[in-house]
Image (tube, rainbow, N blue to C red):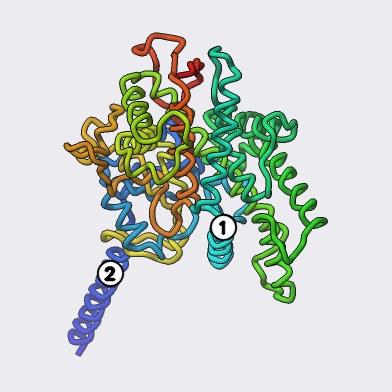
Amino acid sequence: MELLGTTTIFLLVCISCLLLFATWRSISQKEKQPPGPITLPIVGNIFQLNLWNLPESLKKLSKKYGPVFTIYLGPQKVVVLHGYDVVKEALVDQADVFSGRGKLPLFKKLFQGTGIVTSNGETWRQLRRFALTTLRDFGMGKKSVEERIQEEAHFLVERIRNTCEQPFDPGNFLIHAVSNIICSIVFGDRFDYEDKKFVTLIKLLEENNKLQNSIHTQLYNFIPTVMDYLPGPHQQIIKNIEEVDKFTFKIIAEHQETLDPTCPRDFIDAFLNKMEQEKGNGHSEFTIETLSRTTLDLFLAGTGTTSITLRHGFLILQKYPEIVEKIQKEIDCVIGPDRSPCMADRSRMPYTDAVVHEIQRFIDFIPLNVPHSVIKDTKFRDYFIPKDTMIFPMLSPILHDSKEFPNPEKFDPGHFLNANGTFKKSDYFMPFSAGKRMCAGESLARMELFIFLIAILQNFTLKPVMDCKDIDISPLVSTLANIPRPYKVSFIPR
């Protein structure tokens, strides 16, 4: 009996161990995390990453760990998606699951998780739906906005003409012109180029573009709690955004005083009307705070991205005068010297269209993409990704994919041209991202890039201040955005 009892106990122990092992194995398989480098407490992978060129560091890690891997920005876990197939699988095939916005510490500090860009859940859904509908109502993607861009292009050309062929940095001219388009939609009017408030506002944005490359700014995303107490450029970025925020609040207050509910003039008026309609809803997402933040989002996104793309584009075109000649030949053939360019011309100007696409591909403006997150526990390519994990669905490896774009580090409009010279589309062209979080202003940006670039080259030829061979067109790389190197150029009337 005693032997039987011992045997029974032994068998029970064995069975229990087997069950525990099976359960552990099941959990282990279910929660298999994406691989990644060894992480340190508090600082994460800070010592394994080049903060001056994070995209390049992630490229090297992808070669070791594959297209799905994990890094830590301080204590913040991030799953990196590296390559077209894996990004498409996440953002397009599993669009709902990956539709969250990742809380990058700097973004969280600057934008507080409200507005369109950084909000999540029902707040994001309602604000994005309202913004897209309202922007379309006020002409975005339509003929009315195209006419505004044509008018602004005329002002821009005349302003350039007044430089009398002297070399200058066109950055301010371009950002003023581009900003005026979104201002006319959101604020109801454009600003005079000499308007002091407008000039000050643009200077703040330009300063932030430069400061974002500082090591302090990069460190903020790793150790925000520490950096909050340290002086440096990151503190100035925060102050500058606060000043821009005050500017939008003031315009909103002026709109409240002059609002005619029956005749909304712009996006702000439409939002104020929506707030009034939802006055009895205690859970409404439409408040003064979300209006201010959404207005700021639209202004920043509608001002910075396109103007920097154009500025980088004109730097590139200085290096390749033969490309400029081909564009101008197409302009002369299709549009002529006097008529304003329009979007209907694009289908008849495949070379120019290819150049515009190649500029966006080459500069790789937002290499890491704007961070996403998963909205629920997710099984992705045999890996388990917990709810709210931040995701970097990188754009850089897609735009520089060597199979899709041979010799991707070289600027070549041929990447978007068929052998017969017609325009060639590419699924890998994702400068505006993809899926449910893709840029809401894509159609506006495409119109601005095409019309502004053509209007300038219709009227001017570029004259560099140095030999074409010496022009460095590689971007200044940072965590958040690639920006062009400073330069000056003369615009010679044709």
Q: Nearer the viewer, mark 2 or mark 1?
A: 1
Residue drawn at 24 percent across, 33 percent down: 414
| Vertical placement of residue 96 versus 238, above or below | below
The residue beneath circle 2 is 26
The three-letter amino acid code for the residue at tag 1 is Ser
| Vertical placement of residue 244 versus 50, above or below | below
Query: Which residue of the protein is positioned furthest toward the bottom in this rendering?
Result: 1
Residue 246 position within the rendered picture, expressed as x and y whole percent measured from the top left: 74, 44
Residue 267 position within the rendered picture, expressed as x and y whole percent measured from the top left: 64, 56
* Residue situated in front as seen by the camera: 192 or 377: 192
Residue drawn at 37 percent across, 31 percent down: 331
Quarter of image, res 124: bottom right
Q: Considering only order in the chain, which callout, 1 or 2, is on the residue closer to the N terminus?
A: 2
Looking at the rendering, in which quadrant would you find the C terminus?
top left
Q: Can the viewer see residue 230 in this picture? A: no
Q: Can the viewer see residue 91 in this picture? A: yes
| Vertical placement of residue 91 versus 275, above or below | above
Looking at the rendering, in which quadrant would you find the N terminus?
bottom left
Residue drawn at 42 percent across, 49 percent down: 78
The residue beneath circle 1 is 119
The three-letter amino acid code for the residue at tag 2 is Ser
Total numbered labels: 2
Residue drawn at 20 percent across, 39 percent down: 418
Classify residue 238 as left or right of residue 403. Answer: right
* Residue situated in front as seen by the camera: 202 or 89: 202
- Give the class, few, some or many, for how many residues have Cα within 10 Å of label 2's Cα (few <14, many ≥20): few
Residue 237 position within the rendered picture, expressed as x and y whole percent measured from the top left: 63, 35
